[in-house]
Image (spheres, rainbow, N blue to C red):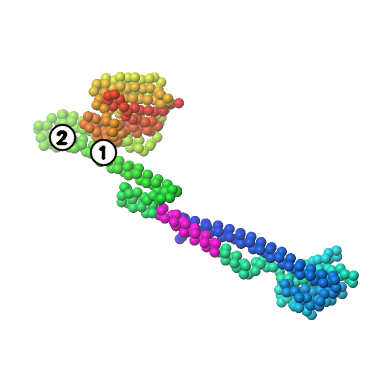
Amino acid sequence: MLTQRTWSVRTRLTLIAVAVAVLAGLVLTVAATLSLYSLADVYQARQTGDVVLKTIELTVHGNPPAELREESLVGIQVLDPAGRVVSSTPGLRGAPRMAEFTPPPGSVRSSMETCSIPRFSGRCVVVVAFRIHRPDGDWIIYSAADVVPWYVHPGLFTVIVGTYLLLVVLAGLGVYHTATRVLAPVNAIRDELAEITATDLGRRVPVPPAWDEIRRLALTINATLDRLEAAVEQQRRFASDASHDLRSPLTAMRAQVEEALHYPQDTDWKGKAREMLTSLDRLQAIVSDLLMLARLDSGAPAARGPVDLRDLCEEELGRRRRRVEVVRELEPGVTVAGNRLQLTRLLTNLLDNAERHAASRITVSLAAREGTAVLEVLDDGAGIARDQREVVFHRFARLDASRNRDAGGTGLGLPIAREIAQAHGGTLTLEDSAQGARFVLRLPLNR
């Protein structure tokens, strides 16, 4: 069943245009008909008046001729004071008076509309009676003219209605054609988008040359496809890297178990268990980081409150001994609004990363600058090339051997740290330093 919900935009626009044209045309047709009717009525009254004035002039200056020559009216009769018809137009010769009414006392003119005069074959006419004062008494002149119909004239009304219907049809066809042309790029975009989603995310929808809403729609769709392609590629790369990183400890454990089963008498089971525990620890760390990223990606809300970053840094730095010297430059009273557990994880990841790559020292500094808490973690290691500074924040990113995750990380610590920073309305970047890598965390201060 075809309902309004299934109509296309083109159909709806055409129906709306036709409805508007019908209403507007109807109003204009009525207005034009009424105006023409008024003009025709005025014109006929003026014409009747001109004709009757001639007859009145003849009556005032003497007796009018028995036959009046006037073809513009249906008929004229002149009655003497005795009520006898003394003069008339040819069509009323020998006919009785056409009306019995006369102008009321004190008036010289009155009129009525009638359709019952026998000589007029049922035609509806307007009869006007005029009183003429003469010394011998009051004379009456009757004039009859056709009633102007509301449609004025059949031919004229046909032209008006025909023009009205033609304009309605032209409006409908024009809107239908225009909508078809306007929606053609949309249909092309839709078809292309359907093929893109089914075949190749590298394709893009066509961009119309006109600078209009459809062009902006196409540009927005292409930008969305760019982001979608990048996200899919990142997801594919992430899945590939994650499967490789998860496979490595599993493969190591499998090899250790198979070796122990082949040579059970020569196997140091305690040592083998310790080796497997190392692989399990790595596997557990990767799974834990993946779960953390999944929670951050989902945008699940976490409880927040005021967090003193100085206390947080002191607590984390004092939790365990580091293999390198840690220099602290912590300004007191730097408080942000956030989730303490997540911020602790962020700081831990930065410190663990710095410790893995530091030569002998880590510097942790904290300060408040222009409404922003700035936390810096600097190591004195080999540093990171400028063109690799964003790569380290990619999940399972691989750099050169001096700073890759094989040094002890999972390849997810820095991506997790950046996700936490962004979830708190802040940023985590890798910036210039004289030596080593300098990670800078900026968070809005708690107001």
Give the mark, 1 or 2, whose residue is nearer the N terminus.
1
Q: Position of residue 376 (x, y in %)?
A: 33, 25
The residue identified by callout 1 is: 242
Tag of residue 256: 2
Location of residue 313 by image quarter: top left
Q: Amino acid at mark 1?
A: Ala
Q: Is residue 359 among the parts visible in the rendering?
A: yes
Which residue is rendered at x = 39% and y = 28% of the image?
443
Q: Is residue 32 above or below residue 217?
A: below
Q: Position of residue 224 (x, y in %)?
A: 37, 44
Near-viewer residue (164 or 61)? 61
Please indicate whether residue 215 sits to the left or right of residue 230 in the image. Answer: right
Verify whether residue 442 appears in magenta. Answer: no
Location of residue 324 by image quarter: top left
Instruction: Residue at the far bottom: name it.
Output: 94
Q: Is residue 19 above or below residue 58?
A: above
Please indicate whether residue 297 sits to the left or right of residue 323 in the image. Answer: right
Majority secondary structure in the magenta region: helix
Q: Which residues are magenta?
A: 166-187
Which quadrant does the N terminus fall into? bottom left
